[in-house]
Image: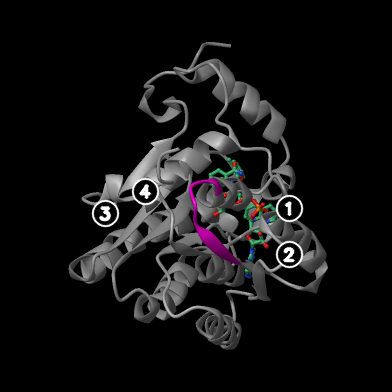
Amino acid sequence: MSYPILAGKTGIVFGVANRRSIAWGIAQAWAEAGAKLIFNYQGERIKDNVEELAATFGPDTMLHPCDVSSDAEIDSFFDFVQSKTSTVDLLLHSVAFAPKEALEGRFIDTSREAFRMAHDISAYSLVGVTRKAVPLMPHGGSIVTMSYYGAEKVVPHYNVMGVAKAALEASVRYLAADLGRQKIRVNAISAGPVNTLAARGISGFTKMLNHYEKNSPTGRNVTLAELGAAGVFLASDAAASITGQTLYVDGGYSIMGMNHPE
Ligand code: NAD
Ligand code: 0WE
């Protein structure tokens, strides 16, 4: 058998809630490629879920709570990481949140507080966790975050999340510029819609999946395994000269200039 592409690497995974999470798809692919992983979980409510999933990689798979809206929890998470390993090679950031009401009406009605929360949790948190990860990456590393097409084009009801994803993608570029000489790369994967917990809170999501199926060059929706494979690529030395980018893993949906009529 050939040497697994991420053998000997240690990765941090932010954003597993359950087995449908994009973070879980990428974590499985990273583990399959030989990486050892450390997971966060957002709060006690989902601890058991994440514990059970993490345990599929062995009973001693590490996890620790971290709500990314708290600097104190980010600090305590990285204290935990440092107590378990001297270096880290990979970091996945797969976290987003906006108050539900902000994803329903018109963008113009976004409250100051909803705007603040969406940007804090969905964009600033990448900067916060990256700053803490860098000292643990003395030999370089790869940081991957998750974005969506609503960052660059108006997608009905995506609203303030689209603005926060634009900030996230710009943060990827600025972080990549800061960290390139330290051999740390930072990229985003812009995924087509996936039926996750975060997506199921959205009214009309099934319609959106059908729309993508009909209008994507591939004629189908993206799978967790395909997002995992893209995550492995960006994490690996095959992507050594790729940094600051947004890689579309959306069946080609975003290249189309016109939708299927009706
Ligand atoms: P998910 O609900 O499985 O994952 C979202 C995660 O964010 C959860 O694990 C949740 O615990 C975490 N989170 C939210 N607020 C947090 C906080 N304050 N502190 C720590 N963690 C917090 O849903 P998902 O669809 O897998 O979302 C993961 C990422 O993928 C998000 O960035 C999302 O924007 C992005 N994305 C999703 C889709 C889609 O269609 N599902 C498409 C493109 C991009
Ligand atoms: O990034 C996302 C969704 C992120 C998300 C989801 C929720 C639902 C529950 C952020 N915050 C919340 N808050 C909640 O209370 N996606 C890319 C999936 C998504 O969400 C949409 C989409 C797509 C695609 C919302 C409207 C339109 C399209």
> Which residue is at the far top?
261
Q: Give residue 51's position: percent from left, percent from top.
A: 75, 64
Residue 35 forms part of the magenta stretch: yes
Q: Is residue 217 left or right of residue 78?
A: left
Q: Could you say which disc has been placed on residue 18 in the image? A: 1
Q: Note whether ligand 1 is within 8 Å of mark 1.
A: yes
| 135 shown above or below 165 | below
Q: Is residue 46 visible?
A: yes
Between residues 203 and 148, which one lies in front from this camera angle? 148
Residue stretch rendered in magenta on the structure = 32-38
| 22 shown above or below 133 | above
Q: Upstream in the sequence, badge 3 or badge 2?
A: 2
Q: Amino acid at mark 2?
A: Pro
Q: Mark 3 sits on what residue?
A: 243
Q: Quadrant of residue 170?
A: bottom left
Q: Is residue 25 left or right of residue 119?
A: right
Q: Upstream in the sequence, badge 1 or badge 2?
A: 1
Q: Is residue 154 visible?
A: no
Residue 157 forms part of the magenta stretch: no
Q: Mark 4 sits on what residue?
A: 234
Helix or strand or loop: what does disc 1 sit on?
A: loop
Q: CA distance from mark 2 to mark 4?
A: 28 Å
Q: Amino acid at mark 1?
A: Asn
Q: Quadrant of the N terminus?
A: top left
Q: Give residue 174's position: percent from left, percent from top.
A: 27, 65
Between residues 34 and 115, which one lies in front from this camera angle? 34
Q: Give residue 217's position: percent from left, percent from top.
A: 44, 17
The mark closer to the camera, 3 or 2, is 2
Whether the residues at callouts 4 and 1 have beta carbons within 8 Å, the answer is no
* Residue visible at 66% across and 71% down in the picture: 63
